[in-house]
Image (cartoon, coloured by chain):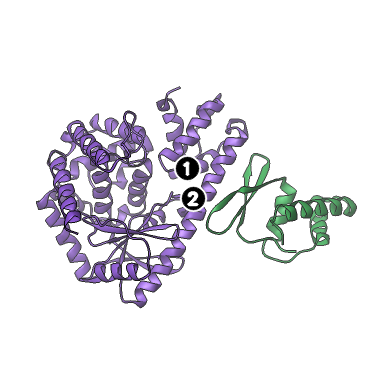
């Protein structure tokens, strides 16, 4: 059996969970134990285990997976809930500590996105991304991490990661970096406009108020981030869910005309349309949730969805040769892979994709030279 | 007796599973299979002190069985949960 054989079943369970609709039971007649086993494993590859568990819970007993696999799915969901509770606990702890130290930050994506899931505890969590928006605060926050002796990771051009117990945190000095200089300037200008006026949205997690990006910019940022990963290696279904569930919940508050203009300005309208069509076709997303006209459907939407389904989380599960463990061989592999992808997807967003390998190469060179200087 | 915090009860078909976790991670080694009446008792007395007699009374009220049978069932459940570390 091929992995692709389970895609219709997987999508059906996922859609029933995120669209909150009953499962089409007939699809699950005569599903073998082997198929269920693959499906349960595949839910992990896409980092949507708890959503698939939600879908499975809607099936009548006669179509349900064998007991051992049902228990396994349930335990995965339980573990995801526990991890979310722990992440939210640490997040609120950090908010209080940083407020006391006058180090305000903006929470990017992640736990802020989880709020838009039918059950916020059922989003597979990642790390905490905290953006320090005031001059000098990023360095001060870094100093604090060093003083507290949390193990620091190598600094990238946009953030530095560290672990606080089991929770991985990334302190950001910038929200995002776009490799096209002209676009990046526009992006940084938009961020500055927001931070200068402290024009944030406030959400509440465990009763604690937390700053997040304002709606319109967040909708743009979520796509920029998603597309950035897609171009380099791939994205999984969790990242797609983050984007469409955010838009489902907040689209009415977004000025469609203004958003379309911004998307055009950022050269992102075309890829946004490709991804939007893919989610309309495969995830039953209503076209009206997108704050832009969808335009003509193109086969690129199928290509993109196939890539998401085949590659899984951040494209880690693409078939073929795996990234070698060595530092430099791994980097070379990832560079070559990105160049190959750029040829396949170039026409979705030529300005982004064609220049990406050069940017990737020069960034690596800069970081390597920085390492040598240190 | 009191049921420990950080447990959850999930239903699979007609079966209920009790999962123990430490508040940070679901502990995969502590999963207890239960029937509907056991799940009912745990849900009824989740955050309070209870005795086996109280459990028996709850069973009598809910399932209209005789007190002797209810008492035997409640005691057996309490023993099973004590062994599993669910009840302290």
Give the residue drawn at x 45%, y 40%. A44
| Alpha carbons under labels 2 and 1: distance apart | 8 Å
Q: Position of residue A348 (x, y in %)?
A: 18, 36
Place residue A144 in its image quadrant.
bottom left
Q: Which chain is green?
A: B
Spot occupied by residue A158 in the image (x, y as percentages of width and height): 23, 57
Q: What label sits on residue A49 in the rendered view?
A: 1
Q: Quadrant of the C terminus of chain A?
A: bottom left
Which residue lies under the disc numbered 2? A80
> Does residue A3 lie above or below A101 as drawn?
above
Seen as rendered, the residue at the extreme top is: A1
Give the chain ID for the purple colour: A
Whether tag 2 and tag 1 are in contact, CB under 8 A, the answer is yes
Q: Nearer the viewer, residue A293 or A32?
A: A32
| Chain bearing mark 2 | A
Say whether residue A318 is visible: yes
């Amino acid at each position: 059996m091929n992995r692709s054989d389970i895609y219709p079943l997987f999508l059906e369970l996922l859609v029933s969970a995120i669209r909150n609709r009953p499962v089409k039971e007939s699809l699950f007649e005569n599903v073998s134990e082997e198929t269920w086993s693959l499906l349960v494993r595949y839910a992990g590859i896409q980092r949507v285990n708890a959503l698939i568990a939600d879908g499975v819970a809607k099936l009548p007993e006669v179509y349900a997976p064998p007991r051992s696999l049902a228990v396994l799915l349930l335990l995965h969901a339980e573990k995801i809930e526990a991890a979310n509770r722990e992440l939210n606990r640490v997040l609120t702890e950090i908010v209080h500590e940083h407020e006391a130290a006058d180090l305000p930050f903006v929470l990017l994506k992640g736990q802020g996105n989880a709020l838009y899931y039918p059950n916020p505890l059922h989003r597979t969590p990642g790390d905490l991304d905290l953006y320090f928006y005031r001059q000098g605060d990023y360095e001060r926050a870094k100093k604090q991490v060093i003083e507290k002796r949390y193990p620091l990771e190598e600094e990238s051009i946009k953030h530095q990661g560290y672990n606080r117990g089991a929770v991985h945190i990334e302190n950001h000095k910038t929200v995002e970096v776009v490799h096209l200089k002209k676009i990046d300037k526009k992006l940084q200008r938009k961020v500055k406009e927001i931070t200068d006026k402290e024009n944030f949205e406030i959400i509440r997690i465990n009763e604690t108020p937390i700053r997040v990006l304002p709606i319109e910019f967040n909708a743009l940022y979520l796509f920029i981030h998603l597309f950035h990963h897609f171009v380099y290696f791939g994205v999984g279904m969790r990242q797609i869910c983050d984007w469409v569930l955010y838009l489902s919940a907040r689209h009415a508050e977004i000025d469609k005309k203004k958003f379309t203009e911004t998307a055009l300005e950022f050269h992102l309208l075309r890829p946004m349309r490709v991804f939007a069509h893919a989610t309309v076709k495969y995830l039953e997303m209503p076209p009206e949730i997108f704050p832009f006209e969808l335009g003509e459907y193109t086969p690129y939407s199928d290509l993109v969805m196939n890539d998401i389904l085949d590659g899984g989380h951040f494209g880690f599960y693409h078939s073929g040769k795996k990234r070698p463990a060595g530092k430099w061989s791994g980097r070379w592999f990832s560079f070559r892979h990105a160049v190959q992808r750029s040829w396949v997807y170039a026409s979705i967003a030529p300005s982004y994709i064609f220049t990406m390998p050069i940017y990737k190469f020069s960034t690596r060179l800069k970081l390597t030279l920085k390492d040598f200087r240190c | 007796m009191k049921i420990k915090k950080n447990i959850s009860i999930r239903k699979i078909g007609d079966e209920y599973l009790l999962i123990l976790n430490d508040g940070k991670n679901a502990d995969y080694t502590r999963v207890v299979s239960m029937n509907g009446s056991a799940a009912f008792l745990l849900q009824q007395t989740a955050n309070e002190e209870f005795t086996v007699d109280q459990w028996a009374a709850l069973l009598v009220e809910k399932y209209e069985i005789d007190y002797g049978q209810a008492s035997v069932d409640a005691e057996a459940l309490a023993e099973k949960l004590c062994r599993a570390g669910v009840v302290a």
